[in-house]
Amino acid sequence: MSKRRATSAGCPDCVDGLDHCHSTLVEHADGTWSCTDDDCDLGPASHGSSSRCQDLAGRCGCAEERVRRSNPRAA
Ligand SMILES: [Zn+2]
Ligand SMILES: [Zn+2]
Ligand SMILES: [Zn+2]
């Protein structure tokens, strides 16, 4: 028997067999992004859900650095 990746019932991308990620995409304050799954190298379009990194407690410090510069639009 071959092992298959678990599929989510109700996920249209799983049904279609598309390459995609069920983990959460994290958007950083500087416009970059990463995935909560360290092994994931898929782009934003392949993710069904996303969060801002400042909403994930203790996950990332980039937003705090930006606040210290007071006015992000000044540059
Ligand atoms: Zn899926
Ligand atoms: Zn961040
Ligand atoms: Zn991912």
Image (tube, rainbow, N blue to C red):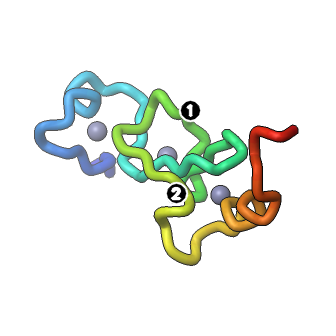
- Considering only vertical position in the picture, is 28 above or below 45? below
**SS type, badge 2:** loop
- Considering only vertical position in the picture, is 58 above or below 56? below
Q: How many marks?
A: 2
Amino acid type, mark 1: Gly
Give residue 60's quadrant in the image.
bottom right
Question: Crowdedness of circle 2 by 10 Å Cα count: few (<14), some, many (20+)?
Answer: few
Q: Percent from the top left, x then y, of residue 45?
A: 47, 27
**SS type, badge 1:** loop
Mark number displayed over residue 37: 2
**Closest to the observer, 8 or 60:** 60
- Considering only vertical position in the picture, is 20 above or below 27? above
Q: Percent from the top left, x then y, of residue 62?
A: 72, 61
The span from disc 2 to disc 1 (Cα, nearest Å) is: 12 Å
Mark number displayed over residue 29: none
Q: Earlier in the sequence, mark 2 or mark 1?
A: 2
Ligand 2 shown in quarter:
bottom right
Amino acid type, mark 2: Asp
**Closest to the observer, 61 or 48:** 61
Residue wearing tag 1: 43
**Closest to the observer, 35 or 68:** 68
